[in-house]
Amino acid sequence: MRLAQALTRRPLVLDGGLSNQLEAAGHDLGDALWSARLLADEPEAIAAAHRAYYEAGADIATTASYQATFEGFAKQGVDRAGAAELLRLSVELARGAGAGAGREVWVAASAGPYGAMLADGSEYRGRYGLTVAELERFHRPRLEVLADAAPDVLALETVPDTDEARALLRAVRGLGIPAWLSYTVSGGFTRAGQPLTEAFALAAEADEIFAVGVNCCDPRDADAAVRLAARITGKPVVVYPNSGETWDAATKTWQGPRRFSAGRVTGWRDAGARLIGGCCRVGPETIAEVAGELDTPPDLR
């Protein structure tokens, strides 16, 4: 069944953070490639992380390609052909991990923002000093390779500003794979400071984009964003925020309380969300709770 068709029947559960699941298994993700390094060094670890989320009840696994780019791999001595193979492998690993799920599951091929390749936190600022055309040229080759690997959807995720959104909307044209567009936000604005009304409106008429929403943000910011995305675009909403903790770059530790609770997801669903999961610091146990909430009829809560 096509993913868009499945959404008409029920909300689908996304996985949680891939990096935190890999770190929990003892893997060091301290270099610039982050989880993408394990595509070359230890692919079975990625497959195991995907399986953990499928077993927790996730319907969709997001590939380890968020920080996988031709430019990033080149800095690590991987040539273009090798990088393309690793991008394709990211889809194959997620697909293979779902083969034993005993139910229909799907694969979302992750395409992170330009700032993820820089590995300096600029995906949470945007405004890289590049034109829309330059950003399109950066994204298109990777998206072509990912699309050729035949995922069910392209996840254009953690987008910090409208310039990059415009570039991504151009870059996915003609690829033949549906995509979702997901911004990282703060309050009612993109991380670069543009109003979400403007940001969501960009995708309203884009035929390639079947769902619009937010990820890698505070769960509290997701509440209003889901309602806004549904109202402006009329499309299904995708939402997968972080745990609510904040990253302290100086101490390299997570600080503050967790604010992600499975109890929030029914509000997101009722506001128009059809793809619901978690991002950084949200693990399989929480995804299992999310799946349980979405499976429980309202009158039995």
Image: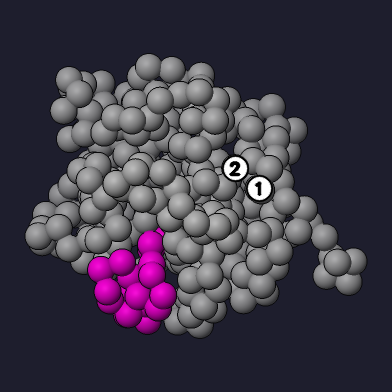
- Residue 57 at x, y percent in the picture: 70, 43
Q: Does the magenta stretch include residue 197?
A: yes
- Residue at image location 43% in from the left, 17% down from the top: 42
Q: Which residue lies furthest to the front in this view?
A: 251
- Residue 173 at x, y percent in the picture: 30, 57
Pointers 2 and 1 in contact (C-beta within 8 Å)? yes
Numbered disc 1: secondary structure: helix
The residue carrying mark 2 is 283
Write down the region rendered in magenta.
178-203
The correct choice, above or below, for 78 with respect to 32 in the image is above
Q: Tell me if mark 1 has few (under 14), some (14-19) or many (20+) residues whose alpha carbon lies within 10 angstroms of its own.
A: many
Q: Which residue lies furthest to the right in this view?
A: 300
Q: CA–CA distance between discs 2 and 1?
A: 6 Å
Q: Is residue 123 magenta?
A: no
- Residue at image location 38% in from the left, 70% down from the top: 186
The residue carrying mark 1 is 287
- Residue at image location 38% in from the left, 30% down from the top: 29
Q: Tell me if mark 2 has few (under 14), some (14-19) or many (20+) residues whose alpha carbon lies within 10 angstroms of its own.
A: many
- For the C terminus, the quadrant is bottom right
- Residue at image location 66% in from the left, 48% down from the top: 286
- Residue 257 at x, y percent in the picture: 55, 57
User: In this rendering, would 39 be left or right of 76?
Assistant: right
Q: What residue type is labelled 2?
A: Gly
The answer to which quarter of the image holds residue 50 is: top right
Please count the marks in the image. Answer: 2
- Residue 83 at x, y percent in the picture: 26, 26
The answer to which quarter of the image holds residue 78 is: top left
User: In this rendering, would 269 be left or right of 215?
Assistant: right
Residue 123 appears in the figure: yes
